[in-house]
Image: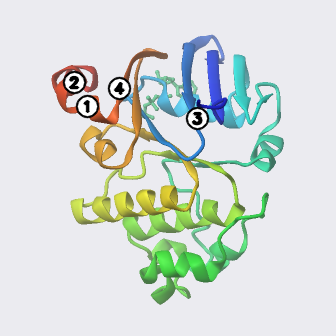
Amino acid sequence: VQGAPLLDVRDLHAHYGESHILHGMEFNVRQGEVVTLLGRNGAGKTTTLKSIIGLVGKRTGTVTFEGENIIDRAPHTIARRGIAFCPEERAIFAALSVEENLMLPPVVKPGGMSVEEIYTMFPNLKERRRSQGTKLSGGEQQMLAIGRILRTGANLLMLDEPTEGLAPVIIDRIGETIREIKARGFTVLLVEQNFRFASTVADRHYVVENGRVVDAIAADELEAKTEDLKRYLGV
Ligand code: ATP
């Protein structure tokens, strides 16, 4: 029997000023799963992640994390509960070295990875430990951004389009990383437009359109639903 999901989102609405962006998002993520939100540009995927972490001012509904509704909590409180967000623009400190970037994140829970463990996972970051953030390639910046959230010990890692703008060989590397993160017991909520990539890492997918979930697809159903997905994603 499955227990309660780690994250359970119900009837989530979000607004930017007068714009009503999310119209009752519903999905859940169980402990140890990799789940994706798939959808076109502007579908509301990023807004969903930002609403969960508390960065969208006006939001309603319930976001239950580890049994507690966090919809009204402030971002720092939510982060301390064990949810980490890696934005599309890869929040790293450009002026600081790789190592400084890895030293800074606050540890919110036991189980955060040490800098040495991060270097084992990403040997090229170790080679570049003294390099400034600005000197890194896009792939290295993404690995560093993921490394930073792995330091915190957060149990739920939310990654916003980690493959955006990266070369195929680097995308494969990010896929390996996500599988390794899952093997270590972390839970991942991934936003993607690249469903081929998503299919290599995720247990389940939700399709988002106009601020709603319009389809839920298990990993083994993806092949049969390829044509539907292409239509949803406009590819
Ligand atoms: P993308 O891949 O482009 O990030 P997305 O599915 O993540 O797509 P969102 O970024 O969540 O989509 O955007 C959903 C809608 O909200 C879009 O219409 C966008 O223009 C709008 N939007 C996003 N951020 C803001 C903001 N800060 N202020 C006003 N509108 C916004």
Point out the frontmost of discs 4 and 3. Answer: 4
Mark 2 crowd level (few <14, some 14–19, many ≥20, 10 Å Cα) = few
Residue drawn at x 58%, y 54% as measured from the top left: 186
SS class of the residue under badge 1?
loop
User: Where residue 218 sits: x, y (%)?
Assistant: 36, 30
Check if mark 2's residue and mark 1's residue have beta carbons within 8 Å. yes
The N terminus, quarter of image = top right
> Helix, strand or loop at disc 3?
helix
Tell me what residue is drawn at x 44 percent, y 57 percent.
178
Mark 4 highlights which residue? 217
Whether tag 4 and tag 1 are in contact, CB under 8 A, the answer is yes
Question: CB under 8 Å between callouts 2 and 4?
Answer: yes
Q: Amino acid at mark 3?
A: Leu
**Farthest-out residue, front:** 1
Q: CA distance from mark 1 to mark 3?
A: 23 Å
- Residue in view at x 30 percent, y 49 percent: 200
Cβ(mark 3) to ligand 1 < 8 Å?
yes
Label 3: few (<14), some or many (≥20) within 10 Å?
many
